[in-house]
Image (cartoon, rainbow, N blue to C red):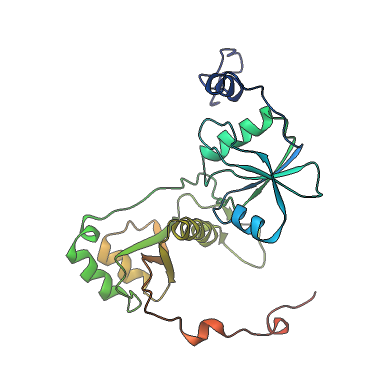
Amino acid sequence: MTWYDHADRTKPVIDPRTQIASKYPDMEIPELPPRAVVFCLGKGLPVLKEHFPCRPVMEKLPGFITHSEVLGIEGVSGLCFLHGGYASPQIACTIETLHVLGVKEVYLVGLCGGFAGHLSVGDILLPERIRSEEGIAKLKTVTHFHYNVPVMVLVCYDMREVWTNPGDRYYRNYNSGEQDASIAATTMMYEAEELGVHTIWIRGFDSKTVVDTFGIPEHMIPVMMLGLGYPNERTKANAWHYKRKPIEDFVTEL
């Protein structure tokens, strides 16, 4: 079964060229450099401006959803930079718009995705108990590392959907579950930080206790908890956060 009809020649409801012409009727469709670096995280353009002499290429991308400024770097031709959004449909809109504006190559920075065969990013379990004072109390019984955060997200993977590699002779029965869940959690951390919400990665719990306490289905495997909250300006980071090992301690040349 295919998701579309190869014989269908009807016009799309929304296409970028028509959208640009409709939204900016008096504007001639400009042409961008052939290569574009598209940041899928909010810190991309600010860091670029901080470290490189930037020049404006386009005041606002004339897209259907995303309207980022487009920048170039002084002395560098054929390349532009912009913020493309955090996920679908923003990224899809950005790519289609760039194609109409003459971009031939796109480099996506910070777009995370999983590898499970039928991964449904965004499947969220919300047990009724977790949205109550009882739920918060139960949370504190399954981990000592709750830090009194107002919101805790339990990140799991679905054993029915993970990608597996039965042919791996070294890592037998390998599946992509922890990898997929970690990618999803990292993306959540980036988005939370962009919104001014701090996060903490937590793994100090017994998975069986968590499953039993909150009634998580058996095919959902807990990987980690992500605590979210606004920072307390009066607190200071533990000194451990500033200790660094020499690179020779953890990098091995093969």
- Front residue (pair 211, 123): 123
- In which quadrant of the rendered view does residue 204 lie? bottom left
223 displayed left or right of 174: left
Expressed as whole percent of the image width and height from the top left, the position of residue 159 reads: 45, 55
Query: Does 139 appear above or below 240?
Result: above
Classify the position of the C terminus by image quarter: bottom right
Expressed as whole percent of the image width and height from the top left, the position of residue 112 reads: 57, 52
Picture residue at 62% right of the left edge, 36% below the top: 95
Q: How many marks?
A: 0
- Front residue (pair 29, 252): 29
Expressed as whole percent of the image width and height from the top left, the position of residue 10 reads: 56, 12
Picture residue at 26% right of the left edge, 74% below the top: 140
113 displayed left or right of 30: left
Query: Does 253 appear above or below 152?
Result: below
Q: Is residue 165 visible?
A: no
Query: Does 173 appear above or below 14?
Result: below
Expressed as whole percent of the image width and height from the top left, the position of residue 127 reads: 26, 55
- Front residue (pair 54, 204): 54
Q: Is residue 113 visible?
A: yes
- Front residue (pair 223, 170): 223
Picture residue at 79% right of the left edge, 76% below the top: 253
2 displayed left or right of 73: left
72 displayed left or right of 194: right
